[in-house]
Image (cartoon, rainbow, N blue to C red):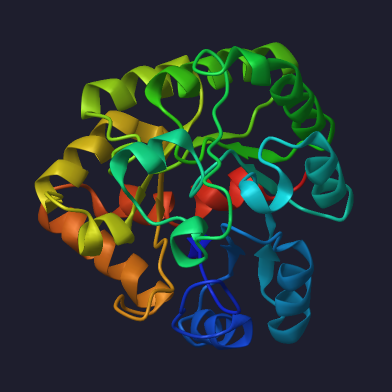
Amino acid sequence: MFDSHVHAGPDVVQRIGDDADVADAFDLAGFSGFVLKAHYEATVGRAHAAARLTGQTVYGGIALNQHCGGVNPTAVATALSSGGRVVWMPTADAHTQRTAGLPRLCHQEPRLPSRTYAVPPVEPAAGADTELVLALVADHDAVLATGHLSDEECHWLSERSRFYGINRLMFTHPSYTVPGLRPAEVRSLVEAGGYAEVTAFQLFHQSGCTPAMLARVAEAAGDKLILSSDAGQPDSPSPPEALMMLIDVLAAEGLDRSWLEAAASTTPTSLFAPR
């Protein structure tokens, strides 16, 4: 198994354990590796250290939030040139996050400005920087993840990814509260090009989320489904346990277990592994 969306400490919010704790949990569970994500810190160096510690495959990247100035090509170039494998478009500081009233760093530190970020067509002025970010992702053959951006922005990123020859596009939990897409909308994104993620975090923490809803989203993604834990919160199971629980819940909804297991192993491994 390979978990493509994991949180660990140190972080600006409390986590279930630090990088070593989480890596040990995956090692004990027999996972081949994971992707380490943080909303407000590049995880490239941390992933390298975790991989050295356990011998697992661990990838890191950068999320384009306020800590790095949002959609910042310089931050992206630095992360990718240092070995990063994924660039997440704005997550906790996406405009959708503020609209939905979801947590942001400025909620913890009110002296910080309440900045949010968007890309075209929502924010045409961000076009030049976003285009350069896409070019850099293509140059490094890295994964572009859409973060918490809207349906319109995801479609724009899909179209521009094709232009730049990006073959590793992942729509970040599109049925989560942000962007909150329905199965038909998820199918439209996947048909335009890219993989769609379903996470265990949704099952545990998303208001109104049901196993049946996630099953319909998984079906909409088809062979472009990615299952991940998005775990690491103190009130979630450990990341490997969370991901296995997600597989069990979806299988109980009548979905093929071998397909689900591939969506949590060979499919994300192929998506993230450098050629």
Q: Position of residue 40 (x, y in %)?
A: 62, 59
Q: Above or below — where is 129 with respect to 115?
A: above
Q: Position of residue 138 (x, y in %)?
A: 77, 28
Most extreme residue toward the front, as rendered? 111
Q: Quadrant of residue 179?
A: top left
Q: Residue at x 50, y 57 (%)?
A: 106
* Residue 3 can be seen, yes or no: no
* Residue 204 can be seen, yes or no: yes
**In the picture provided, is 80 more to the left or to the right than 31?**
right
Q: Above or below — where is 2 with respect to 267?
A: below
**In the picture provided, is 57 more to the left or to the right than 108?**
right
Q: Residue at x 14, y 42 (%)?
A: 213
Q: How many marks?
A: 0
Please identify the quadrant where the C terminus is shown.
top right
Q: Residue at x 46, y 79 (%)?
A: 14
- Tell which of 262 and 110 is nearer to you: 110
Q: Position of residue 27 (x, y in %)?
A: 55, 83
Q: Position of residue 94 (x, y in %)?
A: 49, 39
**In the picture provided, is 238 more to the left or to the right than 252?**
right
Q: Above or below — where is 234 with respect to 143?
A: below
Q: Residue at x 51, y 59 (%)?
A: 105
